[in-house]
Image: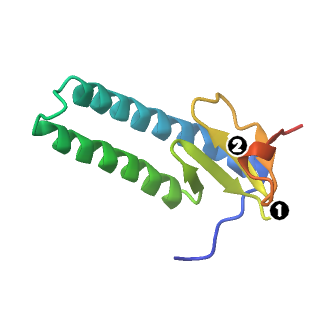
Amino acid sequence: MGEARRWTLEAAQQMFPEVRQRTKRAVQETESLLAERDALAVDAPEREQVEDRIQRAVQRWAGEMESLGLDVKSLWLVDFDSGSGYYCWKWPEERLEYFHTYEEGFAGRIRIQ
């Protein structure tokens, strides 16, 4: 793996619509698969196949985010590394508007001024 990408706020905001659109698509796919799984009986043999498809959809999303140069922190949560901390975004937020230091993490997010 190469050197981590460093983001300016402007570059992160320019990339944000693409990140949100890809995440929205992955969320919709995953929600559809979850509904399909939940409609099956707990012991249905097809349930495992649907679970595998859910896992692949999430992994595909994570791979897409990483290929864009983002850090995937958890499900539907990504960080843009600024070199001094992270511009932080979590689905379904409408804008990229939070920052946190490396030490504080998600719980220490502050609104970008």
**In the figure, 86 relative to 45: above or below?**
below
Mark 1 falls on what kind of element? loop
Residue at 55% in and 37% down: 20
Q: Residue furthest right?
A: 113
Residue at image position (59%, 56%) is 70
Q: CA distance from mark 1 to mark 2?
A: 17 Å
Residue behind mark 2? 13
Question: Dot 1: few (<14), some (14–19), or many (≥20) neighbours within 10 Å?
Answer: few
The amino acid marked with disc number 1 is Ser
Quarter of the image holding residue 103?
A: bottom right
Q: Amino acid at mark 2?
A: Gln
- As rendered, which of 3 and 71 lies closer to the eye? 71
- Quarter of image, res 96: top right
Give the SS element for disc 2: helix
Q: Nearer the viewer, mark 1 or mark 2?
A: 1
Q: Which residue is mark 1?
A: 84
The answer to whether the residues at label 1 and label 2 have Cβ atoms under 8 Å apart is no
Q: Position of residue 66 (x, y in %)?
A: 51, 59
Position of residue 88 in the picture relative to residue 39 (left or right): right
87 horizontally vs 31: left or right? right
- The residue drawn where x is 18% and y is 44% is 48
Left or right of 62? Residue 111 is: right
Q: Position of residue 22 (x, y in %)?
A: 47, 40
**25 or 77, which lies in front?**
77
Which mark is drawn over residue 29? none
Residue at x 83%, y 62% (from the top left corner): 84
Asked if 68 appears above or below 51 in the picture, the reply is below
Q: Position of residue 112 (x, y in %)?
A: 84, 39
Across and down, in percent, residue 36 comes to: 23, 27
